[in-house]
Amino acid sequence: MRCIVTAGPTWEPLDQVRRLTNFSTGSLGGRLANALALAGHDVRLLLSETATWRAPLWAVSVAPFSTGASLAEALRQWSGPDPTAVFHAAAVGDFAVRRLSTSLPDGTLQPATCGKVDTRGGVLVAELEPTPKILGQLRSWFPNARITGWKYEADGTRADAVARGEAQMAEARTDACVVNGPACGTDFVWLRRDAETRILTTRDTLLDALVASV
């Protein structure tokens, strides 16, 4: 089967030389792409330009991405009605810079318009706005795909994280969701529409389960 995997962090420019990004190495998505390829699937991997995971890839077609917009465009280029398994494991940044300002001594804000903001100019104020949710657009791009999203939760309990994962599945019309992060401890919670929820204690058991689901 054709499989599409996204891996690694997106970034958004702060100014022309600085950027906002996520903590992500791209290792889980990269290892998943390898495991799917070894199982005989036709795998296309979208790997972040800033991913630090750079292990060898086996029989995998690779394309880079940088910003959230570039990742979305790459996914659209691979979209279509054919049955596909999409694993959206990339750590997409939730915010982009809407406006940069320098806080003057009297408290007023002066727009920062230079290419590289001078650190001696005082306190820098960044106004952030949410970026478009890529996961919520996948169903329109891949109408017949089995789509698996990820939900990383740092706060609350495991039950809270699972509830957010279930809400994500309903809102984005995905088939499955991998919930992880400090709220889940070291475990992965695999939510599925067509099967019981599973608790997977290691990355290897998670990868085995995801490959077996295709």
Image (cartoon, rainbow, N blue to C red):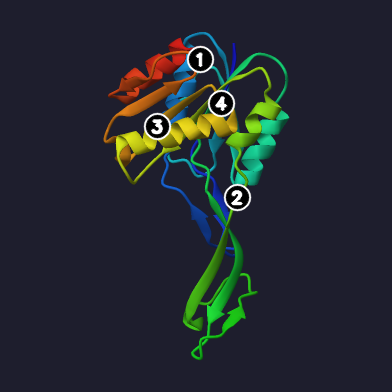
| Position of residue 177 measured from the top left corner of the image (x, y, whole percent) | 46, 27
Q: Check disc 3 and report the residue beneath it.
A: 179
Q: Position of residue 138 (x, y in %)?
A: 64, 30
For mark 1, give the secondary structure. helix
Above or below, 51 against 79 in this view is below
| Inter-mark Cα distance, 1 to 2 | 31 Å
- Marks 2 and 4 sit apart, C-alpha to C-alpha, by 19 Å
Q: Earlier in the sequence, mark 4 or mark 3?
A: 4
Task: Please tell me whether mark 3 or mark 1 is closer to you in this view.
Answer: 3
Q: CA distance from mark 3 to mark 1?
A: 24 Å
* Among the 4 quarters of the image, the one containing residue 14: bottom right
Report which residue position mark 1 lands on. Answer: 37
Residue at 41 percent of width and 46 percent of height: 23
Q: Of helix, strand and loop, which one carries label 3?
A: strand
Q: Amino acid at mark 3?
A: Val
What kind of residue is marked 2?
A: Thr
What is the spatial separation of the Cα atoms under label 2 and label 3, in whole angstroms?
21 Å
Q: Nearer the viewer, residue 199 or 32?
A: 199
N-terminal-most mark, 3 or 1 = 1
Q: Residue furthest top?
A: 40
Marks 1/2 in contact by CB < 8 Å: the verdict is no
Q: Which residue is mark 2?
A: 131
Q: Quadrant of the N terminus?
A: top right
In contact (CB < 8 Å): disc 4 and disc 3 = no
User: Height in image: 107 above or below 25?
Assistant: below
Q: Earlier in the sequence, mark 1 or mark 2?
A: 1
The answer to whether residue 26 shows anywhere in this view is no
Report crowding for label 4: few under 14, some 14 to 19, many 20 or more residues within 10 A (C-alpha).
many
